[in-house]
Amino acid sequence: MTTPGRLAQMARTQTQRILLDEAAEATSAEVRDAQLRVQQVDQALDHNRAQQDKQAKYSACYPPAEGKEDERAELAEAGLRLEREHQYASALLAAALIAHESVTRERAWLDRPAIGTGEPMPVALLFPFAKKIVDAPGYTITVLRPNSDSPDPFWHETYNGTVSRTRARSILTAWSRQEQTYVLRDAHGRLYVAAPALRIELVPTDIALPHSEGDALRAALAVYGFSAYDGGEGGFTSLAVSLTQEASEEETYEGPHFLISSGEHADRPASQHDDVWGASLYDEQGEYVTTLDGASAGSTLAEDCAHIAGAVAQVARRAFREETVDFARSVGKDALAKD
């Protein structure tokens, strides 16, 4: 990399560090607030349940009194509201924990020590290429191409990011099948692709990859008992969620389901979540039905995830009630027919 290129990279790294420090502080505060909220709702729930148990225990010992039934109904209704609030607070906390851990990992990646001394390192040609050679938990990836619009003869960076072991294997396998392309490895485990108009460097790390925005949403949905599966095509990524709790991936697409994404993505690092989730409902034939109202503008990732998870659960409860009513009506009709 040229000296101007190195200076530019240093400036980008410093800016990233500042942004990640701010994000770490914000997500840490959000985790503390969410933990306090869960604790407060827990206490309110315990108090409500104690009151309901006390009324139920001694109700048979007293004569009927005006207003007692209303009081019991109000307590029961308050209990249901608190249970819903507890689910929301728990979903918020689950997503906030993922968001904070993700920022912590991103900082660790940024601060990871450089491999080697910077001196030339012998490389070995990997032919035939074998996936098992790609064995680190994750890699930083840098893509270089020639400077076509500049007198500078050196290569310039066109992409820089982090990838999982699975993604690294996929990239290297694809390039190993191209003509006039070589996959190489040095003594530090760094992997390279050398093609006529492209260079790729993959640097291994033992640091776990940052969580994605989708991981935070999965954590929030899990509080309500829903699973989410990766979907999308053509560069568009999303999460698929069934209206049936604990549905398998195959069962998800066989019935009514949501496709959820932030803009056109659901797999960016959690810190890059810059647009609220959009959740669209499709029927078992894959036909569009409706789109849920999103979280308010300016919501944090955790707030956005908790909002959508709660909205999905609400639609699922309504669908279950309607299905139950239809079933009961059909049973009633069958009984009348038999009579």
Image (cartoon, rainbow, N blue to C red):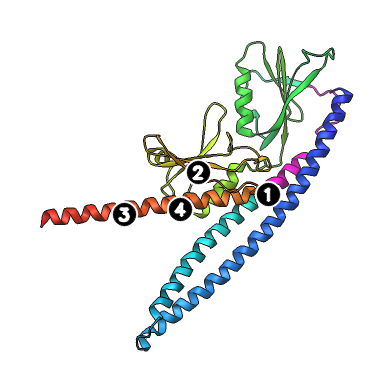
Which one is earlier in the sequence, the residue at label 2 or at label 4?
A: 2
Say which of marks 2 and 4 sits in front: 4
Q: Are marks 4 and 1 in contact (CB under 8 Å)?
A: no
User: On the image, numbered disc 4 is attached to which residue?
Assistant: 314
Looking at the image, which is closer to me, 289 or 328? 289
Q: Are marks 3 and 2 in contact (CB under 8 Å)?
A: no
Mark 1 crowd level (few <14, some 14–19, many ≥20, 10 Å Cα): some
Residue occupying the point 53% across, 73% down = 46
Q: Secondary structure at mark 4?
A: helix
Which one is earlier in the sequence, the residue at label 4 or at label 1?
A: 1
Q: Secondary structure at mark 3?
A: helix
Looking at the image, which is closer to me, 296 or 330? 296
- Residue 301 location in percent, x, y? 63, 47
- In the rendered structure, the answer to whether residue 240 lies left or right of residue 320 reads right
| Amino acid carrying mark 2 in the image | Ala
Residue 106 part of the magenta-drawn span: yes
Quadrant including the N terminus = top right
Which one is earlier in the sequence, the residue at label 3 or at label 4?
A: 4
80 over 103 or under it: above or below: below
User: On the image, numbered disc 3 is attached to which residue?
Assistant: 324
User: On the image, numbered disc 1 is attached to which residue?
Assistant: 101
Q: Are marks 3 and 4 in contact (CB under 8 Å)?
A: no
Residue occupying the point 50% across, 43% down = 228
- Residue 24 location in percent, x, y? 74, 49
199 over 322 or under it: above or below: above
- The span picked out in magenta is 101-122
Marks 3/2: CA distance? 24 Å
Q: Which mark is residue 228?
A: 2
Which quadrant of the structure image shows residue 213?
top right
